[in-house]
Amino acid sequence: MAIISNIRPLEINDVPKIERATPVKNKTPKVVTIEKNPTYLYSALYGTGVRNPRGYFLSSEYNLSEIGRIEDVESMVAQSFIKKIGLMFKQGYALVSHNPKTLKYIEERFAQIEQVSGISSEAFIRQLGESFIKKSNSFAIKVRREESSGGKARKKGKTDLLPVAAYFPAPSETMRYNLDADGKKVIRWEHKIADVPNPIEFNPDDVVHFKYACKDGFVFGTPTLTPAIADIEALRRIEENVELLIYQHLFPLFHYKVGTDAQPATVNEFGQDEIELFKKEIKFMPSEGGIVTSHRHTIEVVGANARALQAKEYLDYFKQRVISGLGISAVDLGESDTSNKSTSDNMSRNLIDTVKDFQREFENKFNTFIIKELLLESDFADINPLDKENMVYLRFNEIDIDAKIKWEAHLTDQFDKQALTYDELRILGGKDIIEVPTAKENDSEVDLGTKYPMWYKTQWKLFGERRLLLASVDEPYTSYSKSGYTTTTIPTSGPESKTSSPSPQERGTPGVEKTDRPPSVKQQLKQFSSLNVLTDGLVEKKFSQVEEAILGTIKSVSSLRSPWVYAQIHLAFSQIEKELLTEITGYFYNGFIKSNASKIYFENAKVKRMPFLRTHIRATLGRLEDDLSVLLKKIDSIDNLKAVFDSIRYRANFIDRTEFYRAYNVGFQVGCEVQGIEKLGIESNLDCDICASKHKTEVKTNITNVLALAPFHPLCQCSLYKI
């Protein structure tokens, strides 16, 4: 941690000069500062500015230096701090804002501050966070210098404040404060280190004080370690006594009994006392030696003999008090032998909740005392940077990933069950609301992708809607195939000239007899082949090429599950899409010309409708590609590969013969629109249940939904005519 005594006023030569924008009048409203606090601080009992306004400084209400000493000698305290700090910064943090302009400004200011102070933003925030967790107090000292700052000078009440050029962290235990004459307000801060003769004083505007769990009337926050200090000291005293107990009973104590009641100890002929004699013998006896005595001598080993105090329960009790006071669990310290998984999860959850509370308080202080001041020093002339939509916030990323996943799954389940709206889902999930187009805008010519970019990046717009639209085209084939129709509509001279369905003989094409059985796919394709918008089977041919290419790839990699196989499929379908869109443009042009519209309007018409056709084609081919990939993943032998392609080959035929006809009709529609025609009629095949419901109905020429026009299902032959 940087030592604040190293801070000195910045000189112009010390730091690079930062170019600033020309100051303009800021729209930030004037902030009125409350100068008088109506309540007293408890520190007023010990001394106020009345005695010595500039020289009487008070230390913190708590001994913050003691916390540092305890951390150095107490392993559980050190580990609890390491766990909390590591968890606090585990997932990182970010600066967020609704306004990219103010966000960019704050990022630039922090980059400038890094350059001036020589301390990275990450290191600065981490140092503040470490002190905040350990001591519930952390300090940042501001150095103001207009030439070294990207901000502008401002007024705070009657005080002129230069812009902040740098921030430096300061040790909390070295900071002291001076109160005003009434004992209600801190008017000066002092940085004082023992044995240093010249402390440094700071104005309150140049000091940022982060405090956690501050009691009413206190200046400093209450360190979270404070309640546990007495328990730590008690545990250490008990451990010292246990250490003495072990020392006393580690080496055995001998009781040497000399003599009996019948033959007590005597004095020998040399005048030596028998007891004193054997004391000397034992004293000089080697450690590995022994003594041989008569029956009058008895030696006993004196020990605890199970009568000593059992200290384990006391040790466990006080240890648990310490662990609880530290806000952690034995599991967090690696003692998991007595806890099951459920208990361990609950214990870890308590630690996570504690750290998240630290994060919320730290965010609040950082946003209020640092980011807001930097925004007030901005040059924004057209906005109020303190408005909610312009404000920039420091936000820690979620550290409880499991809880986040469960919560988001719960929200999604509620949304699926229609218990939440889409906006409520995003708000409860911690995300901003996405603006979506109205129904009226969907039917207009507005470029919705530009106006609502986030909406068009959702999973629904990228994939879900396209698949649903494609399904709505594919599904009617079942009922259509049961209709057994025999007539077709041929727009040979333009859709407007067809008001009835000519017979097969009028077209010079053999008819198909109507039977009770649905026609086969081959019969339907034969009927459809007379249309003048029929292609040469581009998609079908390309689909066969895809089959050959995939077969070759599978043989080369010897695997049906290789990612390379599916990469080849995607590449092949991308090429089909490119060629199909080129062909469709030609049929769109044919329909446009058949409407008798002038060619000079074609480019404008293409801009109006072709994007919708392209989107539909991409969705159609995407559905075919996805289904092919899913089927390939289900087979377990290359011998079944041909059956997979055969099972969906008919859809390639449908795309050829349906989507080109769609392009023709859309071209006809937009051609009529540029001529001022507002409505068109639909001429349908009455033998088809689906098409019969559309017969003689009207459609507007200005609709953009290409699926609202014929064809209404695969191989549909409905046409448009002018009303």
Image: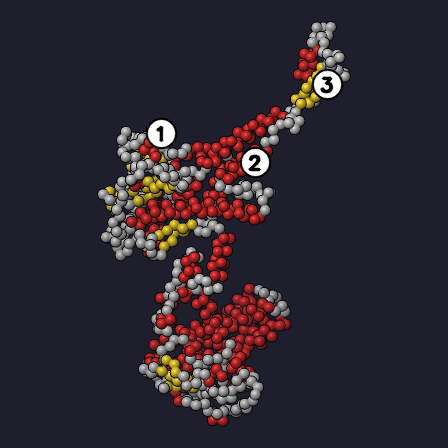
User: Where does the image place residue 563, in percent across and percent down from the top left?
Assistant: 55, 64
Q: Which mark is residue 316?
A: 2
* Relative to 325, residue 284 above or below: above
Query: In 3D space, how far apart are the residues under numbered discs 3 and 2 (Cα atoms)?
Result: 41 Å
Amino acid type, mark 1: Val
Q: Which residue is mark 3?
A: 298
Q: Which mark is residue 184?
A: none
171 or 294: which is nearer to us? 294
Amino acid type, mark 2: Asp
User: Where does the image place residue 446, in percent across and percent down from the top left?
Assistant: 34, 71
Q: Nearer the viewer, mark 1 or mark 3?
A: 3
User: Where does the image place residue 473, in percent across and percent down from the top left?
Assistant: 48, 76
Query: In 3D space, how far apart are the residues under numbered discs 1 and 3 (Cα atoms)?
Result: 69 Å
Q: Which mark is residue 196?
A: 1
555 or 719: which is nearer to us? 719
* Relative to 336, residue 714 above or below: below
Q: Which of the two labelled residues, at mark 3 and mark 2, occupies the earlier sequence position?
A: 3
The secondary element bearing badge 1 is classed as loop
Residue 424 at least partly seen: yes
Amino acid type, mark 3: Thr
The secondary element bearing badge 2 is classed as helix
